[in-house]
Image (cartoon, rainbow, N blue to C red):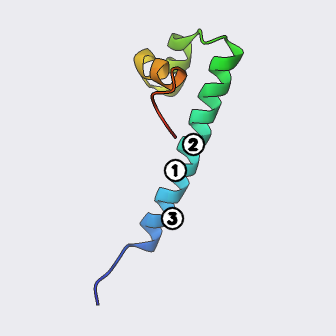
Amino acid sequence: MVEREVPRLRALRTDYDKARAALMQGIREELEARGGQGLNVIARSVDWSPQYIGKIRDGKVGD
């Protein structure tokens, strides 16, 4: 019998996906509240680059 997946790892991946979606939503909400400005402070808050936050703002990054 071939093992298809490890349940514990699948559950961790599900948790990761939910947390990432919540983080992306939070970033979008903060960008909206700041009128699309504040890339640097948002980036520092999540340990991502301002360039990546800009891509999120511009809709080039999905959940």
Mark number displayed over residue 11:
3
Give the mark nearer the N terminus: 3 vs 2. Answer: 3
Mark number displayed over residue 21:
2
Q: Is residue 56 above or below residue 7?
A: above
Q: Amino acid at mark 1?
A: Asp
Query: Could you give the CA–CA distance between mark 3 and mark 1, rounded to whole angstroms?
Result: 10 Å
Q: Position of residue 38 (x, y in %)?
A: 58, 10
Q: Residue at (45%, 15%) from the top-left corner?
A: 50
Q: Amino acid at mark 2?
A: Ala
Residues tagged 1 and 2 counted as in contact (Cβ below 8 A): yes
The quarter holding residue 55 reads top left
Give the mark nearer the N terminus: 3 vs 1. Answer: 3
Q: How many marks?
A: 3
State left or right for residue 22 relative to residue 47.
Answer: right
Q: Position of residue 15 (x, y in %)?
A: 55, 55
What residue occupies the far left of the structure in this picture?
2
